[in-house]
Amino acid sequence: MLGVTEYTARIIDAIKAVPPGKVSTYRNIALCAGMPNGARQVVRVLHSMSSLHNLPWHRIIKSDGRVALPAGYGKEMQIALLRDEGVAVTDDGKIDLDMYGFHA
């Protein structure tokens, strides 16, 4: 990938690997990219590169199974996008990782 570090490219590839109808966590994406302590880097990539690389940002959630975005700042959109893919999400943004979690 042109213009990105090796780790950023790995993060992008790991995010793109999460299929529709599944979710992964910031921590799991970091582990897949070879960065055991890189969850914050995953957040940075999602925030700055989702549009540029057409990343399925809505499929990445917190390790407790909850949507990280606050109400009024994208939470409702993320929940709607996940529900459109068949993921059961509670109104407060909780997802069953045993059922919908993806681990590459």
Image: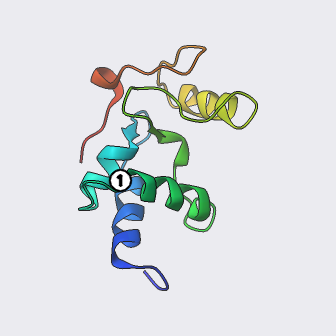
Quadrant in the picture for the N terminus: bottom left
Q: Position of residue 29 (x, y in %)?
A: 34, 51
- Counting labels gives 1
Instruction: In this rendered view, identify the residue nearer to me: 99 or 70.
Output: 70
Q: Is residue 14 left or right of residue 66?
A: left
Q: Bin the neighbour count of mark 1 within 10 Å (Cα to Cα): few under 14, some 14-19, many 20 and up.
A: some
Q: Position of residue 51 (x, y in %)?
A: 63, 61
Q: Which residue corresponds to the image point at 41% horizontal and 54% vertical from the top-left?
A: 15
Q: How is the image coloured?
A: rainbow
Q: Position of residue 22 (x, y in %)?
A: 39, 35
Q: Which residue corresponds to the image point at 58% horizontal and 29% vertical from the top-left?
A: 84
From this view, report whether residue 10 is shown above or below residue 50.
Answer: below
Q: Secondary structure at mark 1?
A: loop
Where residue 42 sits, quadrant-wise, is bottom left
Q: Is residue 35 left or right of residue 40?
A: left
Q: Position of residue 78 (x, y in %)?
A: 61, 34
Q: Which residue corresponds to the image point at 51% horizontal and 61% vertical from the top-left?
A: 45
Q: Is residue 38 left or right of residue 90?
A: left
From this view, report whether residue 100 is shown above or below residue 60.
Answer: above
Residue furthest to the right: 72
Name the residue that disc number 1 marks: 17
Q: Which residue corresponds to the image point at 51% horizontal and 19% vertical from the top-left?
A: 89
Q: Amino acid at mark 1?
A: Ala
From this view, report whether residue 95 is shown above or below residue 37.
Answer: above
